[in-house]
Image: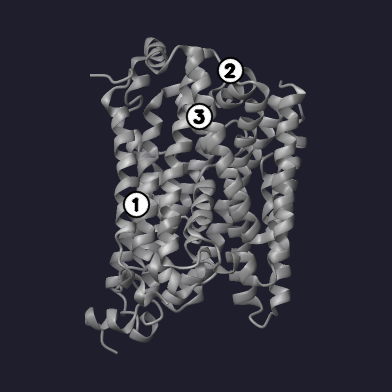
Amino acid sequence: MVTNYYVSVFVIYMLFVFGLGIYLSRWVKSEGDYWVANRQLNGFVGGCSIAATQMSAGSVIGSVGLWYGIGWAWIWVWPLISVGYIIAVELVGRKMQRLGYYTIPDYLEARFGSNVPRAIAAAVITISFIAYIGAQTMAAGYIFRTLFGWPFVGGAIFFTGIYIAYTILGGMFAVAYTDMVQVIVMSIGGMIAVPIILDQVGGLTMLNAVVHSFKSSMVGLGMPPFKLFGFFIVFGLFSMSAPQLLIRIVTVKDFRQARIAVWWATLFNILIITGFAAIGVGCRALFPELASWDLASPTVASSVLPPLLGGLLLSALLAAMMSTTDSLLLTAGSAVAHDIYAKMINPEATEKQKLFIGRVASLLVGVIPFVLIFTPYFKGALIQFIVASSVALAASTFFGPIIIGLTWKRATKQGCIWAMILGFVADAIWLLLKKPFGIHEVLVGLSVSLLALVIISYNTPETPREQLEIIWTKKELDEAGIGS
Amino acid sequence: MTIFGFYPSIWVYWVFHMAVVIVYGIYILTRPDTDYADDV
């Protein structure tokens, strides 16, 4: 357990983030303010928000644990995440900016002219994000228990209470600006630990020599290339199609700022991941016999760094979890309040009613995972793999309809609907079968989804031109030879 | 061959990831204003 110095730094940081979120709540006057910050963010804030949303408990606890356990190889998961942002913004960013909708299901309805894709997307977002939020909440409970000696439940309640409070009051403004603070803390917290660890071990070459003596693969690929490639694909595809990341494209002022946001996000990826990878591998050299890989980053914070920096690193760990969870909460809340309530149940709702329901929905999707983490599904699993299963479900469901659907004019409503349903079901079944032949479930889910999209689209009537005109300009449709 | 104790499979990571940032940064900086003309 850590001393009061660590706790003081950590508590001050938490109160600062909480206060910032509450302060920003005064900017929220409408549904547009709440879900997409009135589309007023600049590229830097948007980029911080993308990076902060990507970095979760899976990164700072789970990934650091994997760097501790298998060595540097896990770092290869990240480049495709950065490339994924770029592909997404270049393929669909311009259209998303032009239309300026609040949620990804909004785009699906506009593209395919039916509220069925909207309803399916909203349901999948809600289900998979509840699992994802649960993983973050669980990680927070473990950290508070390990470091502060708090009961698991107490830590989870504290964490849940703070992020729910600022998110439901400040909406996307609070989420984006607290994300900006949190990504800066993560970068500083991660990078500042590196020279201290290297100093203790005797330098980078010595660190690698030490972990090489444990297992030579720790300074090389570290796991079967096929398995690593599976994770590479999972996270890369998810960064291209994750609703909570894609919607960031709409929160910035224009398409130029969307590109700039993606550039900042890729830069922060490198900074943060390099720091946390060194923390994981360095921890293996200093503490080779930890009871669990997931203890690597808390151990470095409490046993290697001086109190102020240790407190900063602890804050960075919680920052990663909160900045992801608040975005998930907002996205899942928007699926319930905007996509289901405001668009399907009560289209006549006033702005005030929509805002109120948005906040209630956000509250509910924050509280439900807190209850679910006490069920058997969450107990005993490494956090990284809980996160990986929920991101895989979302990637299998959304990649085809969103990324392909917004770029391929021949995709049809029926193709989109079945791509989502079959992608989700195939992924879930493969996961429940415990990944036969060692093939990652997302490769199965995605293959099924894309096949369904292509085969069914070619066997159903083309989408009418007037529907396509919502997404594409008349010039683009004329050039593609699509008649009226 | 190792550099600072890394096998190539690891140090190539930083080369690749930094290249992504640099190349995309140059791409954004060199976009003409006309590239954004139809976005309003």
Residue B12 position (above or below residue A123): above
Residue A313 horizontal side relative to residue A101, left or right: right
Q: Which chain carries label 3?
A: A
Q: Which mark is residue A291?
A: 2
Q: Do labels 2 and 3 share a chain?
A: yes
Given residues A404 and A12, the one toward you in this image is A12
Tell me the kind of residue under disc 1.
Gly
Q: Gap in Å between the C-alphas at discs 1 and 3?
A: 28 Å
Instruction: Identify the image quadrant of residue A160.
Output: top right
Q: Residues within 10 Å of mark 3 (few under 14, many from 20)?
A: many
User: Earlier along the polypeptide chain: callout 2 or callout 3?
Assistant: 3
Is any atom of residue A438 visible in this view? yes
Across and down, in percent, residue A459 comes to: 28, 73
Residue found at x 23% / y 19%:
B1
Residue found at x 43% / y 53%:
A395
Tell me the kind of residue under disc 2.
Ala
* Residue underneath mark 3: A64
Q: Gap in Å between the C-alphas at discs 2 and 3?
A: 14 Å
Across and down, in percent, residue A49 comes to: 54, 52
